[in-house]
Amino acid sequence: MTDDLPPAEPGTTSTRPALMRWLSGRSVLALVVSVIALGFAAVPYVSPDLFGSRVRAYLLAHPEVLDEAVTARQANEDLARVSQTNAAIAANPAFLRPDPADPSVGPENAKVTVIEFFDFRCPGCKAVAPDYLRLVRSRSDVRFVFKDWPILDRGDGPPVSQYAARAAIAANKQGKYLEVYEGLMAERALTIESVDAVLLAAGVDLARAKADISAPETNRHIADIHTTALLFKLTGTPTFIINGKMTAGISPEDVARAIDAAK
């Protein structure tokens, strides 16, 4: 895996459970609740200690019920976050307008636009990056927009996420964005030095890139992305938004299905 996630910062978003898995968890929860309700109905006739010991014994014998309950709760929370974000996007459509500073691939007049919010040190982002890039390169009729959202820097270490995001934006000004995106995502443990190495390997003019990395317009661009992410109530990376709707999953397959649905 990549760098550990910081406890106080927004972390990465793990792959969201599928709807059928959520429904399965709901069914198990309903069964458990029914058993407990029946138990309480019988309390006047059964010793409370006996009832409690039987429930405990059942859960110990079937610990998978607890796992399913946790999974169902997580799925429920994920769906609530998606709804919350989609409502925030709908209330602030101006923040989805094209930003010339954002790296992008595909026609400007595409019927479908995919926006990815990501951090180059995010384990989930790195895991989906190879297949996502294949999707980007295979869907020539779709516009893909990249929002470099550096959120994983620790206060006591070098700002590697910030530097990587700025370096990629600088590479975009030299027409080398996808090569640098691919290289940074493939690097397991990013450092300032390894970011520079990726730039050089992609044919980026490092001196020019260094100037763009620290330029005021780059500062404003990163700040604008952070503001948009907070306004949309995003909680982690990667997050994909297709035609103004956040996907419930983060796999390239989820993105591809959302693209087809949007068409």
Image: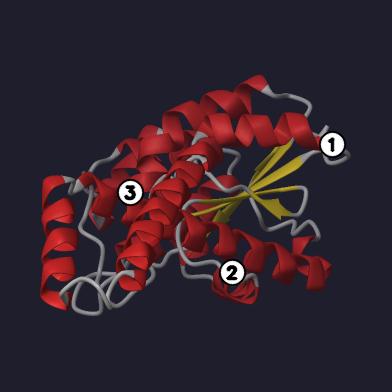
Indicate whether 96 appears above or below 182.
Answer: below
Q: Which residue is the site of mark 1?
A: 110
Disc 3 is placed on an element classified as: helix
Q: Within the image, what quadrant is residue 97 found in?
A: bottom right
Question: Mark 3–mark 2 contact, CB under 8 Å?
Answer: no
Q: Within the image, what quadrant is residue 9 found in?
A: bottom left
Residue at image coords 69%, 37%:
258
Number of dots carrying numbers: 3
- Residue type at mark 3 is Glu
Mark in the foreground, 3 or 2: 3
Among numbered discs 3 and 1, the one appearing first in the sequence: 3
Among numbered discs 2 and 1, the one appearing first in the sequence: 1
**134 left or right of 14 in image:** right
**259 left or right of 75 in image:** right
- Residue 163 image position (x, y, % from top left): 38, 62
Q: Quadrant of the C terminus?
A: top right
At label 1, counting other C-alpha atoms closer than 10 Å, the crowd grade (few under 14, some 14-19, many 20 or more) is few
**Real-space CA distance between mark 2 and mark 1, rounded to the nearest whole angstrom:** 23 Å
Disc 2 is placed on an element classified as: helix
At label 2, counting other C-alpha atoms closer than 10 Å, the crowd grade (few under 14, some 14-19, many 20 or more) is many
Q: Which residue is the site of mark 2?
A: 229
Camera-side residue: 140 or 180?
140
**Real-space CA distance between mark 3 and mark 1, rounded to the nearest whole angstrom:** 41 Å
Q: Within the image, what quadrant is residue 1 found in?
A: top left
Q: Which residue is the site of mark 3?
A: 68
Whether residue 177 can be seen here = yes
Q: Single out the residue that lies furthest toward the top.
A: 138
**Real-space CA distance between mark 3 and mark 2, rounded to the nearest whole angstrom:** 31 Å
Among numbered discs 3 and 2, the one appearing first in the sequence: 3
- Residue type at mark 2 is Ala
